[in-house]
Image (cartoon, helix red, strand yellow):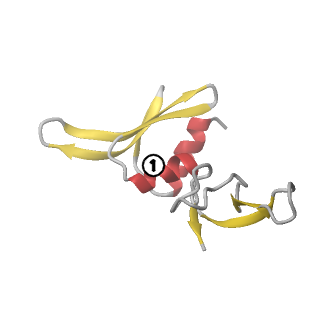
């Protein structure tokens, strides 16, 4: 199954109407007063991956599309240098999180950091 086939299958599962061409798939649209219907998402398969062009999405949708969903926790782990030295890392991807900043999302995996 190609990436385009998988995209179309997922859209069908969710009941999302889409317009398919030999070169790509369009879905989601806005009715524009001067231009008629304008599709807001377009995907073209390139080297077995999808190149997606999206317009008019929320910041939350952008994060979910590129970094994933879910939550993680900031956890303290020993650094191994000194007995009492620790680092704060993401529980999901183990990337260091600066405990001095007030991050709501992990800068690496995009999950929401919860307590």
Provide residue 94's location: percent of width, then percent of height.
Answer: 73, 55
Q: Is residue 20 left or right of residue 46?
A: left
Nearest the eye: 17 or 81: 81
Element at label 1: helix
Q: Is residue 11 visible?
A: no
Few, some or many residues within 10 Å of mark 1 (<14, 14–19, 20+): few
Nearest the eye: 4 or 83: 83
Give above or below for 63 relative to 19.
below
Which quadrant is home to the C terminus? bottom right
**Residue at the left extreme of this rendering:** 34
Number of numbered callouts drawn: 1
Q: Is residue 25 left or right of residue 67?
A: left
Give above or below for 91 relative to 28.
below
- Going 34% across and 41% down the picture, which residue do you hit? 55
- Residue identifier under label 1: 62
User: Toward which corner of the image does residue 37 lie, by quadrant?
Assistant: top left
Give above or below for 2 relative to 83.
above
Provide residue 15's location: percent of width, then percent of height.
Answer: 45, 57
Nearest the eye: 114 or 85: 85
Provide residue 91's location: percent of width, then percent of height.
Answer: 71, 62
**Residue at the bottom extreme of this rendering:** 115
- Going 86% across and 59% down the picture, which residue do you hit? 82
Provide residue 60's location: percent of width, then percent of height.
Answer: 44, 56
- Going 58% across and 39% down the picture, which residue do you hit? 5
Q: Is residue 16 left or right of residue 9?
A: left
Q: Is residue 33 left or right of residue 85?
A: left
Which quadrant is home to the N terminus? top right
């Amino acid at each position: 199954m190609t990436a385009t086939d998988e995209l179309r299958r997922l859209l069908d599962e969710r009941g999302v109407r889409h317009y398919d061409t030999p070169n790509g798939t369009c879905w989601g649209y806005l009715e524009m007063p001067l231009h008629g219907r304008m599709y807001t998402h377009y995907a073209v398969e390139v080297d077995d991956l999808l190149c997606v062009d999206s317009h008019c999405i929320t910041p939350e949708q952008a994060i979910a599309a590129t970094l994933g969903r879910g939550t993680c926790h900031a956890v303290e782990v020993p650094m191994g240098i000194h007995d009492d030295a620790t680092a704060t890392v993401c529980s999901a991807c183990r990337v260091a999180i600066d405990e001095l900043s007030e991050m709501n999302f992990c800068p690496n995996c995009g999950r929401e950091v919860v307590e």
